[in-house]
Structures are given as C-alpha cells and as structure tokens.
C-alpha cells in the first residue's frame, strides 16, 4: 500500500476539484479524503495500491476542466488503513 499527503496549488477551488477528485479516486480504488484549505489550495490524503495512487496523482496534476494546477506537493507516509474516499470541510 502507498500513502501520500498532497497539496495542490493553483486555481483549484470553485471549479469542482474536490468532487472530481473523489470520483476519480473511487474509480481507481484509492481511499482517503480531500478538502479545501483556507489559503486557496486543496489538500488530500491518498492511500491504495501504488499504481492506483500514481494514476490519481497524475490526474490531480491536471485536475478537472476549469482547474489550473500550478503545483502538486507530495509527501510519502505510512499507510494507516483508510477506507472510502470523502470530501472533508475546509481546514
């Protein structure tokens, strides 16, 4: 299992980024959560098979139509056994 903490910067709020991320995560079988941050970025926690997590990360670098991703910061961590994929409130 692979665990990644992600911060996505750019025009990523108000464009459906969180909802599209949840849909894509569920499609590829990644668990975790996604939320808006007060600074205008989007934060996510991803966990799953390495290939599935990598596929979601590649998608997150583009995002949904209307998003303009400037950067995706990734930090690897230890898996914690997350289940499901949810949209959380703003930090």
Image: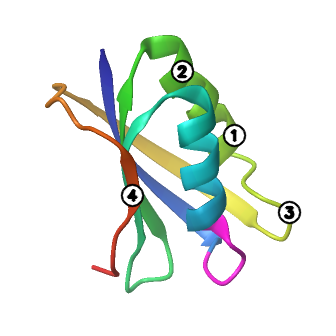
Residue 21 at x, y percent in the picture: 59, 53
Would you say the magenta stretch is mainly helix, strand or loop?
Answer: loop
28 displayed left or right of 42: right
How far separated are the C-alphas under marks 1 and 3? 11 Å
Q: Is residue 43 above or below residue 72?
A: below
Q: Earlier in the sequence, mark 2 or mark 1?
A: 2
Residue 6 at x, y percent in the picture: 41, 48
Tell which tag, 2 or 1, sits nearer the viewer.
2
The answer to the question of whether label 4 and label 2 lie on touching residues, with beta carbons closer than 8 A, is no
For the record, the magenta segment spans: 13-17
79 displayed left or right of 60: left
* Disc 3, SS: loop
How far separated are the C-alphas under marks 4 and 2? 17 Å
Residue closest to the eye, 30 or 78: 30
Q: Is residue 64 above or below residue 5?
A: below
Residue matched to label 2: 52
Q: Earlier in the sequence, mark 4 or mark 2?
A: 2
* Disc 2, SS: helix
- Residue beneath the point at 19% across and 26% down: 79
Visible residue check, residue 45:
no
Tell which tag, 4 or 2, sits nearer the viewer.
4
Residue matched to label 1: 59
How far separated are the C-alphas under marks 1 and 4? 17 Å
Q: Earlier in the sequence, mark 4 or mark 3?
A: 3
Residue matched to label 3: 65
Tag of residue 86:
4
* Disc 4, SS: strand
Residue 42 at x, y percent in the picture: 48, 67
How far separated are the C-alphas under marks 2 and 3? 21 Å
Q: Earlier in the sequence, mark 2 or mark 3?
A: 2
Q: Earlier in the sequence, mark 1 or mark 4?
A: 1
């Amino acid at each position: 299992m692979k665990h990644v903490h992600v911060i996505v910067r750019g025009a990523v709020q108000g464009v459906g980024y969180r909802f599209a991320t949840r849909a894509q995560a569920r499609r590829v079988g990644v668990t975790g959560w996604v939320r808006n941050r007060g600074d205008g970025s989007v934060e996510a926690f991803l966990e799953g098979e390495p290939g599935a997590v990598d596929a979601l990360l590649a998608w997150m670098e583009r995002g949904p139509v209307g998003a303009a991703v400037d950067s995706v910061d990734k930090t690897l961590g230890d898996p914690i056994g997350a289940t499901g994929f949810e949209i959380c409130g703003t930090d």
